[in-house]
Amino acid sequence: MTPFTTHAGRVAPLDRANVDTDQIIPKQFLKSIKRTGFGPNLFDEWRYLDVGQPGQDCAARPLNPDFVLNQPRYAGASVLLARANFGCGSSREHAPWALAEYGFRAIIAPSFADIFFNNSFKNGLLPIVMEAETVDALFAQCEASEGYALAIDLAAQTVTRPDGEVHRFEVDAFRKHCLLHGLDDIGLTLQHVDAIRAFEARHRAARPWVFAG
């Protein structure tokens, strides 16, 4: 997993509350568990004017010009600004996979659905909870200023606006440690690989019949 330490990036404002995981990555794209290939279908029903199907060449599909990610001023955005209850709905881990592959490193919202929130940390995506009034101010600034960008420092737990104003955010210490060091569940387990191998060796020596044949 790619570590998250600091990040400065352009902001895209998704001004919708209760964005669910079926809107983030529709159900027809959930056939693969490879963690890759989902970026082109992020927000598929909103980004395109046709109905998307797995394996389709998205480069040839008609774009919805009214959708925020299709507007040139938000091209290359890596910070998503969202409204309350982002990531609600089913527990599909494909949702953070799609967001991350598209290029987002962080999402700022007043609240997140619990399972999506947990899945984001496990996939190198930083969900930042801020007060609704603070999020309102960020939306207003973003929409008023083309090229609006934010600087995020996970170690310091701060988001810095272009005008220099700094907002702090809270994050669980264990999740923070994992993101800073790029540790997903597998990475955490592999930190104990020597102890695991030693246990397996003792187990094999003590019960050789288990491993016979």
Image: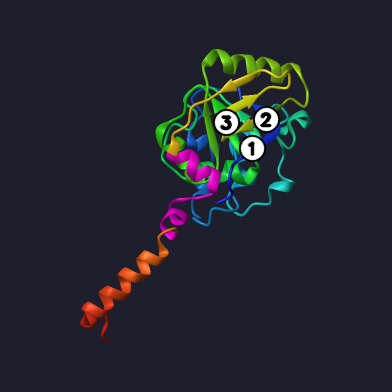
Magenta part of the chain: 174-190
Q: Is residue 180 magenta?
A: yes
Q: Earlier in the sequence, mark 1 or mark 2?
A: 1
Question: In the structure shown, which secondary structural element does the residue marked by tag 2 occupy?
Answer: strand
User: Which residue is label 2 attached to?
Assistant: 151
Q: Earlier in the sequence, mark 3 or mark 2?
A: 2
Magenta stretch contains residue 67: no
**Nearer to us in this view, 24 or 146:** 146
Which amino acid does the dot numbered 3 rest on?
Answer: Ala
In this image, 194 relative to 67: left or right? Answer: left
Q: Toward which corner of the image does residue 77 lie, by quadrant?
A: top right
Q: Position of residue 32 (x, y in %)?
A: 51, 55
Q: Residue at the spot x=56%, y=23% of the render?
A: 168
State the count of labels.
3
Kindly indicate whether the residue at mark 2 contacts the one at mark 3 (C-beta within 8 angstroms): no
Q: Amino acid at mark 1?
A: Thr
CB within 8 Å, label 1 to label 2 = yes
Mark 3, residue position: 156
Query: Does 166 sit left or right of 87 as displayed?
Result: right
For badge 2, the amino acid type reads: Ala
Is residue 18 shown to the viewer in this render?
yes
Residue plotted at (44% across, 60% down): 190
Residue 17: x and y in percent read 52, 22
Give the residue at mark 1.
6
Q: Position of residue 172 (x, y in %)?
A: 44, 34
Residue lying furthest bottom: 213
Secondary structure mostly taken by the magenta-highlighted segment of the chain? helix
